[in-house]
Image: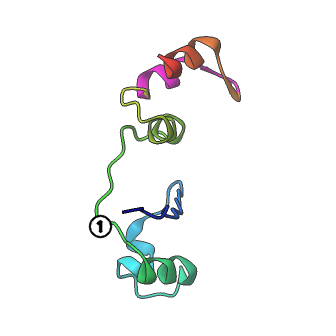
């Protein structure tokens, strides 16, 4: 049996409240495209993050590594990551 590849759309929005999206019950029409995607596909009712800060949370999401939160916050310099932070991700 051959499985066909699945298409995934990851929507990551910083500081957006789920209770202000129509697909989660908000009464105003604030998110028609997201609501349509949710209606026609899979909608997750619960989501958890490894960290409340966007950069380390995304790093964990995309690398599948758990405890990046403190490493990235402490080792980030300016707009880029320091060599130590890059080493922590590769560890």
Is 21 placed left or right of 78 in the picture?
Answer: left
Residue 21, located in which quarter of the rendered image?
bottom left
Magenta: main secondary structure equals helix
SS assignment at label 1: loop
- 4 or 40: nearer the eye? 4
Which range is magenta? 69-78
The quarter of the image holding the N terminus is bottom left
Q: How is the image coloured?
A: rainbow
Q: Is residue 77 located in the magenta-colored stretch of the structure?
A: yes
Q: Residue furthest right?
A: 79
Number of marks drawn: 1
User: Callout 1: 10 Å neighbours few (<14), some, many (20+)?
Assistant: few
Q: Is residue 16 located in the magenta-colored stretch of the structure?
A: no
Q: Residue at x 52, y 64 (%)?
A: 7
The location of residue 59, given as percent across then percent down, is 51, 35
Q: Residue furthest left?
A: 46
The location of residue 9, given as percent across then percent down, is 54, 63
The location of residue 22, given as percent across then percent down, is 43, 82
Q: Residue at x 54, y 58 (%)?
A: 13
Is 9 placed left or right of 41 in the picture?
Answer: right
The location of residue 53, given as percent across then percent down, is 47, 39
Q: Is residue 16 above or below residue 63?
A: below
Is 81 placed left or right of 71 in the picture?
Answer: right
Q: Residue at x 47, y 64 (%)?
A: 4
Q: Residue furthest front?
A: 1
Q: Which residue is mark 1?
A: 45
């Amino acid at each position: 049996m051959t499985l066909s590849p699945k298409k995934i759309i990851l929507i990551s929005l910083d500081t957006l409240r789920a209770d202000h999206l129509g697909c989660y019950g908000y009464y105003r029409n604030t998110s028609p495209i997201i609501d349509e995607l949710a209606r026609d596909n899979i909608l997750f009712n619960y989501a958890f993050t490894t960290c409340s800060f966007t950069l380390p949370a995304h790093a964990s999401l995309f690398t599948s590594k758990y405890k990046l939160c403190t490493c990235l916050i402490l080792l980030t310099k300016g707009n880029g990551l320091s060599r130590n932070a890059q080493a922590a991700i590769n560890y």
